[in-house]
Amino acid sequence: MDDGGHEGGSLAAKITHLIGTLYPEGRPGYAKLAAQIRERTGSTLSSTYLWELASGRKRNLTQETLGTLAAFFGVPPEYFLDDAVASRVDTQLELARALRNHKVRSIALRAEGLSDDTLDALLAMVTEARKIERLGPPAGQPDDEPGA
């Protein structure tokens, strides 16, 4: 799965990233994806066309296809056209993915109501834990940000 960097913002990288985000345990085949798109949006895209988009063999989208993909993945259509929008949406998707983990969600919920000083201390501990486990900063947060 792509880590959020889109190889220069290519359409193929964005589609591949969204597929990986939607299916973290592994991408279904393109025929199954096409069927899911049809079920969820009512629009039809062939499995071959999906593969061509995801592999970079096709690079241009019609407005209709753009709308269909945006609706299926739950992103604004601009995601596919504007790297700044894609970056913002990817940060939100990363947060949503992290919150799927019940332990992460539990930590976040238990922190509600704590003072700013206590939250800063918790953030410092989590930052150190990420360093110990050789993890980079969370998506959308630079290394030097203590937790603004």
Image (cartoon, helix red, strand yellow):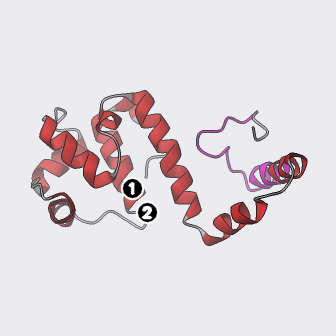
Q: Which residue is mark 2?
A: 24
Kindly identify the residue that appears in the image at 14 percent across and 61 percent down.
Answer: 38
Q: Which residue is mark 1?
A: 20
Tell me the tag on residue 95.
Answer: none
Q: Please tell me which residue lies in front, 4 or 63.
A: 63
Q: Secondary structure at mark 1?
A: helix
* Residue 74 is inside the magenta segment: no
Q: Amino acid at mark 1?
A: Gly
User: Where is residue 22 drawn, in percent x and y?
Assistant: 38, 59
* Residue 26 visible, this angle: yes
Residue 144 lies left or right of residue 101; in this view the side is right
Q: Amino acid at mark 2?
A: Pro
**Dot 2, crowdedness within 10 Å: few (<14), some or many (≥20)?**
few
Question: Toward which corner of the image does residue 72 lie, by quadrant?
Answer: bottom left
Residue 67 lies left or right of residue 141; in this view the side is left
Q: In the rendered structure, are the residues bearing label 1 and label 2 in contact, judged by CB atoms less than 8 Å apart?
A: yes
Q: Secondary structure at mark 2?
A: loop
Question: Toward which corner of the image does residue 75 lie, by quadrant?
Answer: top left
Residue 116 lies left or right of residue 91; in this view the side is right
User: Where is residue 139 drawn, in percent x and y?
Assistant: 59, 44
Q: Please tell me which residue lies in front, 81 or 110.
A: 110
User: Where is residue 6 drawn, in percent x and y?
Assistant: 41, 36
**Boundaries of the magenta span:** 124-144
